[in-house]
Amino acid sequence: MCDGRFDLTGRVVIITGGAGLLGEQYALALSRSGAHVVVADVKGEAAERVASAVEGAKAISLEVDVTDPAAAIRMVEATLSAFGHVDGLVNNAALDPKFSLVHADEHTTSFERYPLGLWNRAIAVNLTGMFLCSQAVAPAMLSGKRGVIVNVCSTYGLVGPDQRLYQPARQAGPRTYKPVTYSVTKSAVLGLTRYLATYFAGQGIRVNALTPGGVYDGHDEEFMRQYSWRTPLGRMANRDEYSGAMIFLLSDASSYMTGANLVVDGGWTAW
């Protein structure tokens, strides 16, 4: 028998970074649970593609730069214009540069020489973007006396990166690193989550964090082997394995939960 507390029928949820690897999965899963979704992403065409793939519920796409205060406000205004209310915000947009030639400088630069410009850019997207979007959506949620904000963290917000993962023995050339910016900004997400949860206490707004572990995205065999060895479940996550947790956090099934951090990492941080 289905537990109706997980039902999101008629609820309106904004997803920033909605065209990303996990953002797309959240949009599809939430819509299957009955929610109307707003796919917000700096890549407008990609957001439109995701919104068009949503079935069973209404969806719109918006091109949004979360570092722009005016853009965050316009995002909420467009949501209210389309649906009349907003029930959930998933702060998912973040910079997590892939290990590719395009981002080579970010991964081959040691901490001692890490550029201030890259530091400031990551803080603007990964942290300030969450602040601005939460700030923009708050008046509508306060007016409706209900709302849920979910801030997406990372295991590297809980523990430091295992840099050995990024130094496979067979690698030739310069050393590579997981940048300092990712861990620092994701750690700060938890502080923002707790602050907002207590700030909105008694006002009908719940704020929690979701901390996913590594998700498979075409990684090479050596990385997969090394990552899997470090995880109690012995593998990386599939891209759809965080969606259930997101539905839980946005639904009434988590009604007695605020200021918390739900860790779904295959046991990575349990060692």
Image: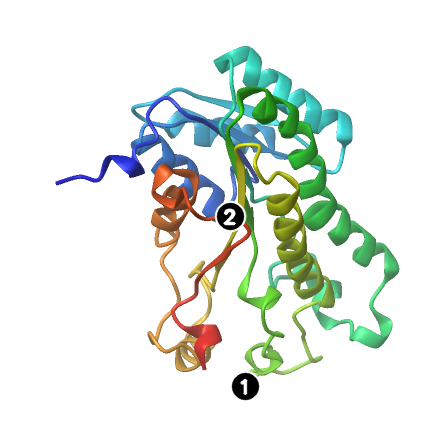
Position of residue 154 measured from the top left corner of the image (x, y, whole percent): 55, 60
Q: Which residue is mark 1?
A: 170
Q: Residue furthest toward the front?
A: 202
Disc number for residue 149: none
At 87% from the left and 60% from the top, the residue drawn is 116
The image position of residue 252, as x and y in percent, is: 36, 38
Q: Quadrant of residue 11?
A: top left
Name which residue lies at 86% across and 72% down.
Answer: 113
Q: Nearer the viewer, residue 226 or 173?
A: 226
Q: Position of residue 50 (x, y in %)?
A: 45, 32
Cα–Cα span, label 2 and label 1: 45 Å
Quadrant of the snapshot with the N terminus: top left
Q: Is residue 181 left or right of residue 223?
A: right
Q: Which residue shows up at 42% across the image and 45% down it?
A: 249
User: Can you tell which mark lies on residue 258?
Assistant: 2
Front-lying residue, 125 or 255: 255
Q: For the residue labelled by badge 2, is the local secondary structure a helix, a strand or a loop?
A: loop
Of residue 245 and residue 70, the one placed in the foreground of this image is 245
- Earlier in the chain: of badge 2 and badge 1, it is 1
Amino acid carrying label 2: it is Thr
Across and down, in percent, residue 27 comes to 42, 36
Label 1 Cα neighbours within 10 Å, binned few <14 / some 14-19 / many ≥20: few
